[in-house]
Image (cartoon, rainbow, N blue to C red):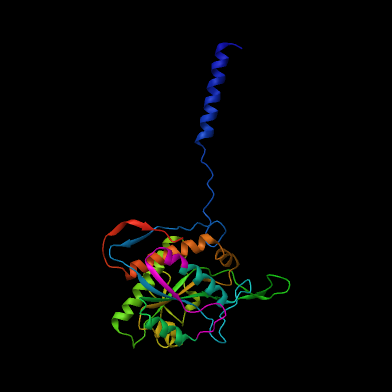
Amino acid sequence: MPKTATLLGLGFLFLARTATASEPATVAPTPTWPAPGAPLTVSEVRFPKGFGKRRIYLDAGHGAEGNTGNKGVTCEDEETFTLRVAEDLAKRLEATGHFQVRLSRKPGERVPYPTRVAAAEQWRAHAMLSLHSDSRGTPMPWSPKPDQECYRQDAAPGFTVLWSESEDAAAGLQSGRAGLARALARRLGQAGFPPYDGVDYEGLYAIDAAQAGVFVAREPTHRQIFVLRKPRIPSVIIETHHALDFEEAARWREQRTLEAFAAAVAQGLVDALGPQAPTESRTARPR
């Protein structure tokens, strides 16, 4: 082959490679929660100097006599879900070395709500967190297994945090409730949990304009929610997810979800309960 032809051939090959390299690469979009693979961030929890230990009363929602809560998309009772998540969260919070945790109930126990509030106050807890799952929208019957029938609605995922603006609460207590709710919601959002927009809350709760995912129980709704209005310590309800959403319920069985949730809750508690001081260089990660 003549030398000129070889050079021309090499020149053509170079141009062809250049054109190929300049073509835009196809990047797969990041999946959105609760799709499988949607990312969650497990952040290191930072504690300010002098934080010490905080006492957290962790309420596994429902589980009182005749009160099993909702039935999720896999026919799991809410009381079963909340106890499972509360037990896991308690272990991870205590593993940081900065929290003492008491659970409101054990497997098989039926504990009235007044008993739970009294126990939290007698223990002088710094905060009371009541864990729940939500049930939203208009569900449709479906069968996850041939011998089961429950309900499904896949259009309203996300978490919410509720606090009570009750008229009989002192201003300092209301401020503590609001600060705790907003700090927890902010950290959950940063971890990748999406806040629910509250479409189905109209007439029940008011939107807290200070933080996405936070809602306020006011007159007369707050009177129906014992763990929000009665405690004389800061108390909130965390609705972890939409229990009738198949994909979201599945994500809440993943260890990554529980780990990210615990880290976000821990940092939210630090934000709400800790002194305003520079953070220590040492960090702790919930395990």
Between 53 and 187, the residue placed more toward the observer is: 53
Between 43 and 17, the residue placed more toward the observer is: 43
**282 left or right of 252?**
left
**Where 39 falls versus 105 (above or below)?**
above
| Residue 215 position by quadrant | bottom left
**Where 91 falls versus 226 (above or below)?**
above
Give the mark count: 0
Where the N terminus falls, by quadrant? Answer: top right
- x 37%, y 83%: residue: 122
- x 32%, y 67%: residue: 52
Magenta segment: 91-111
Residue 240 can be seen, yes or no? no
Where is residue 284? Give x, y as percent. 39, 59
| Residue 221 position by quadrant | bottom left
**123 left or right of 66?**
left
Q: Is residue 96 magenta?
A: yes
